[in-house]
Image (tube, grey):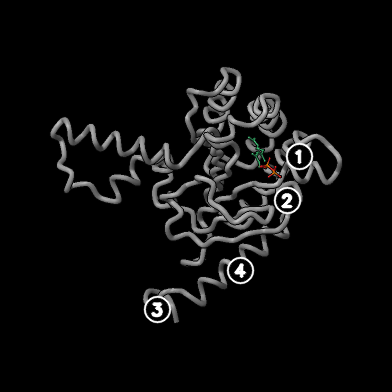
Amino acid sequence: MGKNQLNHLAIIMDGNGRWAKARKQPRVAGHYAGMNNVETIALAADKLGVKVLSLYAFSTENWARPKEEVAYLMNLPVRFFDKFMPSLMKNNVKVNIMGYLNDLPKKTYDVVQRAMRETADNTGLVLNFAFNYGARKEITSAMKELGGMIESGSITSQEITEEMISDRLMTANFGQYRDPDLLIRTSGEQRLSNFLLWQLAYSELAFSEKYWPDFNEKDLQGFVGNFAKRHRRFGKVDESDS
Ligand code: FPP
């Protein structure tokens, strides 16, 4: 425990398409395998003491993919919660979906709202899906809100603080865990792709060569172990450091 504890883990689940291609399967087969791996990694993260797991499942830019693939991805939450809701309940997992949910197809919207409602009283791992999420849009929305407060005279521009910006992002309800401690991106790509740009300011970054469907509990344990070591090497000299 202590300050090396990994409270908020964020993952960019990349490489589903290439995983499928390597098996001569359609891209969507990779997304299905990726969906199944969400359950595996969520339970593994829970075991490691993670409090919030944020997963980038669909970005505001992903609408530009072929229509059939978008339709498949939009249906994944339906399949995921159909298949895994009993396990999520049993493991006390609380589901959160952050993103521009009003723009989702009705069926997707309904299923994610239901998942949040049904798990609202669970007190374990927060499984946070970023779905139709984009960080620049999120920050822009926060700026518009603060701009409105200036226009109405409730604050001056000089009164804006970092805290006020954090409070208007989609992670605000995670309180002290709002910013990820560690971000992992799979599949060898090293980009943020518009994920949690503000919140990742001080996060450790780690990259796995594995495609998301192949990224397993052991891989996660390795990254979490490295995270602890990195902090021992570069950690502050105050507080409980000895
Ligand atoms: C990136 O791989 C992955 C996605 C765009 C989709 C991620 C979604 C899941 C893993 C399932 C999410 C589950 C739920 C419940 C919503 P890619 O398609 O960009 O792969 P590529 O880079 O190899 O083409």
The answer to whether mark 2 is within 8 Å of ligand 1 is yes
In the picture, the disc for residue 226 is 4
Tell me residue 213's x, y (percent): 74, 46
Labels 3 and 1 touching (C-beta < 8 A): no
Labels 2 and 4 touching (C-beta < 8 A): no
Q: Kindly identify the amino acid type of the residue bearing the numbered disc 2.
A: Tyr
- What residue is at 50 percent from the left and 45 percent from the top? 194
Q: Earlier in the sequence, mark 4 or mark 3?
A: 4
Labels 4 and 1 touching (C-beta < 8 A): no
The answer to whether mark 1 is within 8 Å of ligand 1 is yes
The residue under label 2 is 211
Q: Kindly identify the amino acid type of the residue bearing the numbered disc 3.
A: Val
Question: Relative to residue 149, is residue 209 depicted above or below?
Answer: below
Is any part of residue 51 visible from this angle? Answer: yes
Q: Nearer the viewer, mark 2 or mark 3?
A: 2
Q: Kindly identify the amino acid type of the residue bearing the numbered disc 1.
A: Gly
Tell me residue 148's x, y (percent): 23, 32
Residue 228: quadrant of the picture:
bottom right
Q: Kindly identify the amino acid type of the residue bearing the numbered disc 4.
A: Asn
- Tag 1, which secondary structure? helix
Q: In this view, does 1 lie to the left or right of 223?
A: left
CA distance separating discs 2 and 4:
19 Å
CA distance separating discs 3 and 1:
45 Å
- Tag 2, which secondary structure? loop
